[in-house]
Amino acid sequence: MQSLHSSWNNKRTRLPPPIHLLGLALLLLPSLPSPTSSCTKQEKVSLLRFLEGLSQDSGLTASWRNDTNCCMWKGIICDADDAVKEISLASMSLEGRISSASLGNLTSMLSLNLSCNSLSGDLPEELLLSRSMVVFDVSFNNLNGDLHKLPSTTGRPMQVINISSNRFAGQIPSTTLESMENLVAINMSNNSFTGKIPSTICAKNHSFHIPVGLGSCSALRVLKAGHNKLTGTLPDELYNATSLEHLSFPNNRLQGALSPEYIVKSNNLVILDLAENELTGEIPANIGQLNRLEELHLETIILRGNSFHGELNNVNFSTLSDLKILDFMLNKFTGTVPESLYFCSNLIALRLSSNNFHGQFSPRLGNLKSLKFLSLTNNSFTNITNALQVLKSSWNLTTLLIGTNFKGEAMPEDETIDGYQNLQVLSIADCSLSGKIPHWLSKVKKLRELLLSNNQLTGPIPALTNYCPKLLNLGNNKFSGVIPMEIGHLKGLAALNLSFNNLHGEVPQSNCNLTNLRVLELSNNHLTGEIPAALENLHFLSFFF
Ligand SMILES: *[C@@H]1O[C@H](CO)[C@@H](O)[C@H](O)[C@H]1NC(C)=O
Ligand SMILES: *[C@@H]1O[C@H](CO)[C@@H](O)[C@H](O)[C@H]1NC(C)=O
Ligand SMILES: *[C@@H]1O[C@H](CO)[C@@H](O)[C@H](O)[C@H]1NC(C)=O
Ligand SMILES: *[C@@H]1O[C@H](CO)[C@@H](O)[C@H](O)[C@H]1NC(C)=O
Ligand SMILES: *[C@@H]1O[C@H](CO)[C@@H](O)[C@H](O)[C@H]1NC(C)=O
Ligand SMILES: *[C@@H]1O[C@H](CO)[C@@H](O)[C@H](O)[C@H]1NC(C)=O
Ligand SMILES: *[C@@H]1O[C@H](CO)[C@@H](O)[C@H](O)[C@H]1NC(C)=O
Ligand SMILES: *[C@@H]1O[C@H](CO)[C@@H](O)[C@H](O)[C@H]1NC(C)=O
Ligand SMILES: *[C@@H]1O[C@H](CO)[C@@H](O)[C@H](O)[C@H]1NC(C)=O
Ligand SMILES: *[C@@H]1O[C@H](CO)[C@@H](O)[C@H](O)[C@H]1NC(C)=O
Ligand SMILES: *[C@@H]1O[C@H](CO)[C@@H](O)[C@H](O)[C@H]1NC(C)=O
Ligand SMILES: *[C@@H]1O[C@H](CO)[C@@H](O)[C@H](O)[C@H]1NC(C)=O
């Protein structure tokens, strides 16, 4: 994205100085009549026509007056020649339609931003086909229609198109997009586009090979079309779009495998997000193999929620030194976690949950010093003692989710476990662990959520006064004894689940001090006595006894 911004900024700096400076100069010399001191009548007519189409203009009418220079109107920016160059009306609560033959007639307009309004109806085609527009953003509206009918164009300067989060349907308007040689970013996510990703959308521009449809993505850096209904495979031609930095198609119905060719060539790729599709096959072993002279910049790989399978050990992750986020959750990977992954020392978030990995945690996991989020839930890892020892020195770790592993093992009573200074969320739920709540947990001062439900933990519930959690789930264990009085000290507690244990005695009156409590589950114990009156008044108490 860095280079996207710089290229756009470079473009801007070549433009004349902004009009408000000029406008100020003219104000200081009011007696000098200037034939160029106003936008044209034609521009006013176009803008007023747009205004007419709005059913809710949020007071624009007061500013957009026919008898004033439209360069002074709210949201309008003119160039040095007093021609409208920019319309900036994002987040104005505008409603209604974008009238045709209105904004499309502004022949000097470089940038149109109508994002985050409630505009509906079709997108007038002359807007996307504008001969001047460079940046076009109508994201977050209710626009609809089928853009596929748009014709092919030539010589359009368009660089940035954001039509995301609308209700556009039909196929991706490939003919139009292909013909825009200057595109740097296309964001089409969160619409209802159907059909295949057009194969020509990013055909490489070989000087010796002019692809059908003139498609040339030599400049395209961002391509986002997530949250649509796209089908088919990732087109091979996409693999040649070597300028791509951000490729994002999550939540569609894409099928097929990742071509090995692809990863090798995408040496500019920073973000690859193909989550929640129907992709299969193995991760190409050459994911990190590169031309010796090139670096791989991949920072984010999200392949969550597909059907990828096979052993990741075939992949050498060690060349992906920039990797910050790796999300392989909900696939069918098997084998052990590859040791090469621990060379990715910049990893901040690693999620391998809901696969079929096995083995013990590698001591090298502790090498990931930047790791903040680690989820390995729902695999077949073993040795909880080792797991907790390995991770204790991960100082930056704030979230650790390792439940649904370690089936039937014993919770270590190992007092040499210390560390976890920054841990806020810990889940070791659903492991059928025996043993007690370990004492070292009381030293984890920042813990806000502790989930140990669905184990076989026994013994009394510790006073917990040092734990300070917001969410405490100890449900479905074998805890015995009484609910400790001190639980009332946990003023911040929002949810407490002690159900399905062997607790007896009365619900302590001190529980009434839990003024932030919203969920309290105490069912299926042997508790006696009355519900403390104050608890009955807790409005958000969702479940009791
Ligand atoms: C704006 O004013 C001009 C005269 O200055 C007039 O001809 C035109 O009809 C007006 N347009 C609108 C939309 O009121
Ligand atoms: C806008 O331009 C079209 C032709 O490009 C023309 O037919 C139409 O009258 C113009 N609209 C206005 C409001 O000037
Ligand atoms: C449009 O405006 C919104 C709100 O100010 C902003 O977040 C967005 O980046 C703008 N779009 C472009 C393409 O600059
Ligand atoms: C629309 O996408 C463009 C290009 O990626 C981006 O610059 C802009 O900020 C986005 N607009 C919003 C409102 O997020
Ligand atoms: C694309 O649009 C989505 C909203 O629909 C937004 O969250 C995202 O930031 C946009 N991406 C870029 C790169 O602008
Ligand atoms: C998708 O778009 C709708 C409006 O069309 C919006 O309400 C919703 O927040 C968007 N979702 C995302 C993930 O951007
Ligand atoms: C291919 O790229 C070159 C230089 O980047 C450019 O001059 C040429 O017009 C492009 N050809 C096509 C078909 O886009
Ligand atoms: C991709 O580029 C290579 C040359 O680098 C070329 O041989 C191949 O045909 C291209 N593939 C596609 C699908 O365009
Ligand atoms: C992985 O790649 C690194 C760097 O290229 C290399 O040193 C190492 O030997 C490779 N490991 C394997 C198992 O191939
Ligand atoms: C935490 O992560 C940062 C980088 O995000 C790193 O500079 C720092 O050394 C890490 N802290 C520890 C104690 O490892
Ligand atoms: C489990 O891990 C601990 C600590 O690393 C180690 O001492 C023990 O031998 C391991 N147990 C098994 C069965 O490998
Ligand atoms: C509950 O609150 C009362 C008054 O706020 C205080 O005196 C009492 O010590 C608290 N009890 C517990 C167990 O925290």
Image: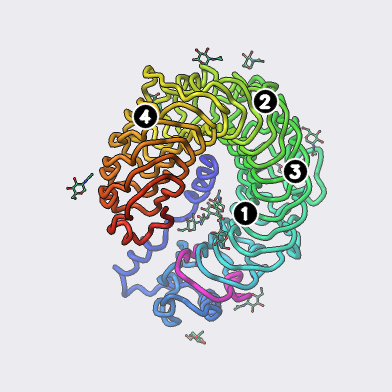
Whether the residue carrying mark 1 lies under 8 Å from ligand 5 is answered with: yes
Give the secondary structure at mark 4. helix
Q: Nearer the viewer, mark 4 or mark 3?
A: 4
**Residue at the spot x=35%, y=40% of the render?**
469
- Identify the residue under disc 4: 441
Residue 189 is labelled as 1
> What is the spatial separation of the Cα atoms under label 1 and label 2, in whole angstroms?
30 Å
Q: Nearer the viewer, mark 1 or mark 4?
A: 4
- Identify the residue under disc 3: 234
CB under 8 Å between discs 1 and 2: no
Q: Which residues are magenta?
A: 84-105
Answer whether residue 86 is magenta in the image: yes
Q: Earlier in the sequence, mark 2 or mark 4?
A: 2
In the image, taking residue 375 as reference, residue 485 lies left or right, namely left
Question: In the rendered image of this protein, does residue 60 appear above or below residue 508?
Answer: below
Residue 389: % across, % down: 45, 19
> What is the spatial separation of the Cα atoms under label 2 and label 4, in whole angstroms?
33 Å
Question: In the rendered image of this protein, does residue 101 appear above or below residue 280?
Answer: below
